[in-house]
Amino acid sequence: MHTNDAPTAIGRIIDAFPKEGQQFVASQLAWSLLGVVCQFLLPRSDQPGLVLATELMTVNSGIEACIRDRRFSQIPGLMQIGGSDGMHTVDDSLIELLLAHRISLMDAMAHARDPNFVKDQFQQALKSQRKGWFAGMFGK
């Protein structure tokens, strides 16, 4: 299925059914779905080729309730705090690729759910790296 993220994929599955049956489908999907994986291939900035950015949503009790009640806008927040369940958002993946110098900031921003979040987190991580580098250089 071609969607940009996990919540949109779930919404499209439910919307494929007639309106009168969508609540039942949402309940059944919430009960039976194990997870959703989204993937993007982005141009590499460090060498020719492409690199994979991903989003992984596993269904826990919070995600299940959001699917059942069709509160898809709350799912990204649950994914951000669901790292212990193996979840990560596409924004998390983009930040990781940026820090590894595998993609450009422009490509990351173009594929981000929240471009401002990606830019801010990337800049904060760069500042932290610089502080660590300077501390290592001067023994502090």
Image (spheres, rainbow, N blue to C red):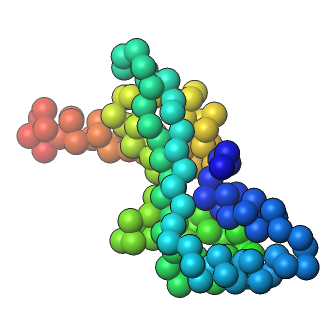
The location of residue 99, given as percent across then percent down, is 37, 37
- Foreground residue, 46 or 4? 4
Relative placement, left or right, of 48 versus 55 is left
Compared across the picture, whether 14 is left or right of 136 comes to right
Image coords of residue 109 (percent x, y): 60, 36
* Residue lying furthest top: 48
Would you place residue 79 above or below residue 1 in this image?
below
**Whether residue 132 is situated above or below residue 63 in the rendered picture:** above
Residue 12 in view in this figure: yes
How far across and down, in percent of the image, does residue 105 sit?
Answer: 52, 30
- The picture quadrant where one finds residue 27 is bottom right
Residue under the point 50% across and 72% down: 34
Which residue, as the protein is rendered here, is positioned at the far left?
139
Name the spot of residue 81 as percent of width and height, x first.
Answer: 47, 70
Which residue is painted at 63% across and 34% down in the image? 110
The answer to whether one can see residue 120 in this image is no
